[in-house]
């Protein structure tokens, strides 16, 4: 009887143990079955703080090993770009980060792709005689970007955020800044795009602010180029009187691609637009403002709500005033070209492109001769002197990075 009890006790223990194990296994299986599926890990773009990158790398101006004397004006990949994100959830811009490489990812429904929520700026950083690097008038670019953003309902970064992002991009790519004396510069392209998806027409809930940069040489090798011949665009309008011609949105440039390429195919380096309403008033070139000097010695440039305010043009106007010239920003009839002794296109990329002939229908306006005029030459040299550090910056236009 004692032996039987012992056997019964062992059997009971074994049964209880098996029951416990079975319950445990069933419980574990149930947990696995109802547990949420693990999230797939997505590839992250490497982001690092800019200060760590530049300090650890010990970057120096002009050490990227490029042919600095023959850069031309074209895109070259650099170490990386600066990125900031704004979301409706936070209502603020994220801290700026340096992103290695040149690729970005965005939702296929991004408003930049579908509804044109995209604007940009262009400015340059120049190596100085003392080895430092300075940006030219970044605050003015920040103000113009703000105007563009407001027009197409995007949140702009503050002036301080804009300027610091530009500084960061330069510091992270110091070795790509063309050395002093090469005639080149580091061209910066701040870009703001709607990255949040929308299928209906409305602003996005997420935006990306990017600052890319690339080293460029003089647009024309040796500095101020020889005068070029322009053609007036008759078949297309650049902008409507109450449209978006006065802001730097991407769509403005897409609309100019066809007439611009047609002009070049016909042998005209630059194309000039007239106002869309009367087609009698000069507005601007494809990517540059129009400036002229009358035979009476007056600096003139068109005034219109459809013209993009050029930072280069504003700089030239100030310098012209300091040269003792009268400056007029007003409506300019196309026929006034006959009264011009100098004319030019002006902008960030080239500063000044002299124009000595303008074709308009059956008429050809001749302005000056085959060499840049003395006033445009002086204006060009004074701006470039300030940018390169060869002349004092009494206007406070340059900012050290």
Image: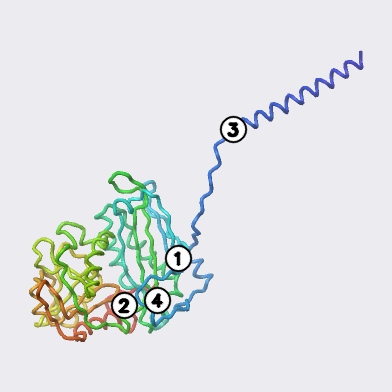
Which numbered disc, 3 or 1, marks the residue that appears first in the sequence? 3
**How dense is the environment of label 1, judged by Cα within 10 Å: few (below 14), some, or many (20 and up)?**
many
Which numbered disc, 3 or 4, marks the residue that appears first in the sequence? 3
SS of the residue under disc 2: loop
Which x, y percent locates residue 49?
48, 62
Which numbered disc, 2 or 4, marks the residue that appears first in the sequence? 4
Is there CB contact under 8 Å for labels 2 and 4?
no
Label disc, if present, on residue 267 of the rendered structure: none
Label disc, if present, on residue 133 of the rendered structure: 4
Picture residue at 50% right of the left edge, 61% below the top: 48
Which x, y percent locates residue 29?
64, 31
State which mark lies toward you, 2 or 4. 2
Residue 252: image quadrant is bottom left
Picture residue at 39% right of the left edge, 65% below the top: 212
Left/right placement of residue 37 relative to residue 79 reads: right
Picture residue at 40% right of the left edge, 50% below the top: 107
Which x, y percent locates residue 328?
12, 74
Task: Look at the picture and state if 8 lies above or below 18.
Answer: above
The alpha-carbon separation of the residues under discs 3 and 4 comes to 61 Å
Label disc, if present, on residue 219 of the rendered structure: 2
Foreground residue among 396 and 247: 247
Q: On the rendered image, what quadrant is the N terminus found in?
A: top right
The alpha-carbon separation of the residues under discs 3 and 1 comes to 44 Å
Which numbered disc, 1 or 4, marks the residue that appears first in the sequence? 1
Residue position marked by numbered label 3 in the rendering? 33
Residue position marked by numbered label 1 in the rendering? 80
Task: Look at the picture and state if 208 lies above or below 122.
Answer: above
**How dense is the environment of label 3, judged by Cα within 10 Å: few (below 14), some, or many (20 and up)?**
few
The alpha-carbon separation of the residues under discs 3 and 2 comes to 65 Å
């Amino acid at each position: 009887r004692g032996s039987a009890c012992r056997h019964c006790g062992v059997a009971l223990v074994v049964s209880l143990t098996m029951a416990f194990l079975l319950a445990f296994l069933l419980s574990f299986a149930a947990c696995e079955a109802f547990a949420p599926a693990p999230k797939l890990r997505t590839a992250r773009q490497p982001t690092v703080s800019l200060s760590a990158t530049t300090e650890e790398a010990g970057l120096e101006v002009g050490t990227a090993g490029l042919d600095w004397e023959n850069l031309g004006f074209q895109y070259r990949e650099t170490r990386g770009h600066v990125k900031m994100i704004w979301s409706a959830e936070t209502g603020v811009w994220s801290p700026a980060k340096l992103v290695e490489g040149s690729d970005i990812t965005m939702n296929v429904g991004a408003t930049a792709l579908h509804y044109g929520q995209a604007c940009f700026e262009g400015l340059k950083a120049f190596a100085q005689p003392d080895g430092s690097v300075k940006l030219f008038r970044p605050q003015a670019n920040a103000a113009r970007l703000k105007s563009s953003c407001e027009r197409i309902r995007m949140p702009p970064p503050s002036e301080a955020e804009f300027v610091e992002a530009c500084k960061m991009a330069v510091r992270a790519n110091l070795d790509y800044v063309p050395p002093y004396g090469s005639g080149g510069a580091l061209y910066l392209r701040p870009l703001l795009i709607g990255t949040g998806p929308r299928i209906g027409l409305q602003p996005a809930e997420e935006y990306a602010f990017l600052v890319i940069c690339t080293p460029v040489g003089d647009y024309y090798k040796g500095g101020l180029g020889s005068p070029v011949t322009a053609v007036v665009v008759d078949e297309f309008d650049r902008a409507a009187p109450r449209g978006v011609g006065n802001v730097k949105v991407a769509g403005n440039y897409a609309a100019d691609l066809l007439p611009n390429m047609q002009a070049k195919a016909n042998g005209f380096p630059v194309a000039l637009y007239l106002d869309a309403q009367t087609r009698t008033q000069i507005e601007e070139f494809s990517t540059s403002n129009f400036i002229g000097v009358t035979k009476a010695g007056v600096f003139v440039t068109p005034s219109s709500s459809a013209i993009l305010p050029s930072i280069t043009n504003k700089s030239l106007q100030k310098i012209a005033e300091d040269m003792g010239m009268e400056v007029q920003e007003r409506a300019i009839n196309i026929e006034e070209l006959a009264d011009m002794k100098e004319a030019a296109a002006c902008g960030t990329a080239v500063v000044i492109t002299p124009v000595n002939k303008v074709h308009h229908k059956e008429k050809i306006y001749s302005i000056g001769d085959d060499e840049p005029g003395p006033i445009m030459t002086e204006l060009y040299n004074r701006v470039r002197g300030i940018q390169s550090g060869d002349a004092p910056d009494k206007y406070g236009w340059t900012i050290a990075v």
